[in-house]
Image (tube, coloured by chain):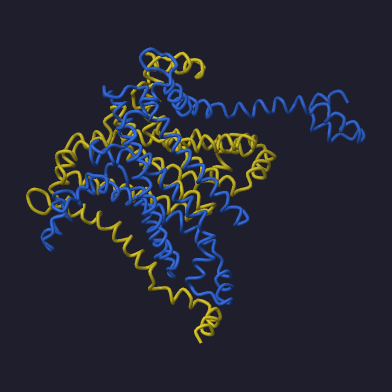
Amino acid sequence: MQPQVARGVTDVATSTTGSRSPAKARIRRLPSRSWSYIITSWLGLVPFLLFCLLFELLPAVVIIEGSFTDSNTGVATLNNYQRLFSQASNLHAFQTSVSISLVTALLGAAFGFLAALGVYNLRTGWWRNFLIGFSSIAANFAGVPLAFAFIATLGVTGFVTVAIHDWLHISLYDLGFSVYTFWGLVLVYTYFQLPLMILVTVPALSALRPEWKEAATNLGASSFTYWWRVALPILLPSLIAAAMLLFANAFGAYATAFALAQGNINLVPILIGFVVAGNVDIDTGLGNALAVGMIVVLLVALTLYTAMLRRVNVWQGK
Amino acid sequence: MATASRVLQPSQGKSVPVRRSFGLDKLFLLLVILYLIVPLGATLAFGLSGANGIGFSTYQQIFSDPNFSATLLLSLGLAFASTILAIVLVTPTAYWVQLRLPRARPLLDFLSLVPFAVPAIVLSLGLVQVYGSSNSLVNVLSLGLVPLLSNPPFNIVNTPPLLACSYVIIALPFVYRPIDNSLRAINTAVLTEAAYSLGSGWWRTFLTVILPNIWPGVISAALLTFSTVMGEFTLASLFGIFTFPIYLNTVGQNEPHEAASLAILSFIFTLICVLGIIFFVRRGAGGARREDQIEIAAVK
């Protein structure tokens, strides 16, 4: 008995000394074993958690702390938020950032949904896979290269600008269009929003069962009635979730806007970029307050996104 | 009559999509594809038509510029370092959580979602403050690691190693998701028990049994990280490190034709990475493809 007990729980459980003593031994020993088990289990997570602490959580903590601190004296203050709300340029930056993200998210969601419908209705699998592959490439083609691609296309001497001028004798820039302004940036952002919407929507469309269409048709529904009364209500949570994803995607974008206008469009990320680069007009405290504002807006979008995704999962019985 | 014909349609099975096949959706699909292709074609043409006629002269200029190869090498090094670090950090952790600590899963899910709420620009502002200035709260919260990393023996402030570490954080959502999905698709517990009962240790089980089974997820995570780091501009520019996207931005200020050609080169690079993912993921078990695709494009 003595050596068996010393060798541990599993040996005791398999010993032939009766059915009661192993059970007792297990009850007595499990807590101590499971404590060491739990500790070693958590120890395995330490490298990853430390890494996240150092490079992910601490920056966020410092920003939140810094937004409530005066950057010169180090005293706790609400002054940063007061300045955020009292200076017109900051509020204007938030307004521009939110409206550019909303406009491109809605444009991307509307046209992307219709295009995804087209992809979904394609009957040749080869074309479908090709278009989905192309969409993932286009969705990843962003930042500085995308900005220069649009300058080469629609800039003052851009290929399309010149072509329209030569063939149709219309000068876009005389009509007031410019790729370096708000609406130019909308065009550029839409470029990566559309393929992202297609990527997100095609799987959601596969959740529509053919039986529903057949049942609706049997009951005398036209194609329009089916889409308006059956398919769209089912798809609505997916569509809202996708639009929120697109919104967050555009709201945090910095590189594209910076490379396009070199900081001439007043967006929140551009303002924060000035802070990091050491611009004297905005101090770190105000920069932190702006960053917290961005985090809050993004959290609202992400909360809506997860809530909608949960509804999708409930409906699809996952 | 109209009702009767409508009722008849389901019996013809596939006739419903056929009727729709030249509808509004196809028209919009065509328009969207045009919208995606026209800038690419225009950029290619713009890059080829340099100051002295049409030709590959801009490409010759680019390849002979020493800054081009220097920044490309730096970016490639950063991309390899971040990819390896991300995979080495996340894969064993995800397996460990799946096997030993399922209750820590919400924590990992949370940590992999934080980069969505804290975009690169905000992260850079935070990192500059954490590693640039001495802050007693940070020193305590980091268990003394931040002062250690910010002072001479291991100074990482505004150096490529810090950049690589922050790239791992940016890439976390699309590293963790595919790997976690692949791990869920296989029966980790049974495979591990079988390996253990045959006398294999934890690392050997992980490297020779689990890893080959989740290879598609790992490859897709690696290629997404690689492609993200190659194109990342925000953090590099704010840390003042001269990577390839910074070079592209500097060139673009003076030489629009060369910038267009460089943009095409970047596109070809993205193309190779995404084709690699499609190739590897399609060969392996699909898993939950949907989440992969959602995460495929998050860093702008």
Q: Could one spot residue B280 in this view of the protein? A: yes
| Position in image of residue A269 (x %, y %) | 34, 35
Q: How many marks?
A: 0
Quarter of the image for residue A29 reads: top right
Q: Which of the image's four quarters has the C terminus of chain B?
A: top left
Q: Residue at x 45, y 22 (%)?
A: A65
Residue at the bottom extreme, as displayed: B1
Tell me the shade of chain B.
yellow
Q: Which chain is depicted blue?
A: A
Q: Residue at x 36, y 19 (%)?
A: B132
Front residue of A142 and A235: A235
Residue at the left extreme, as displayed: B52
| Position in image of residue A183 (x %, y %) | 26, 48
Q: Could one spot residue B76 in this view of the protein? A: no
| Position in image of residue B80 (x %, y %) | 38, 36
Quarter of the image for residue B21 reads: bottom left
Front residue of B243 and A158: A158
Q: Is residue B34 above or below residue B59?
A: below
Q: Is residue B86 above or below residue B143?
A: below
Left or right of B167? Residue B182 is right
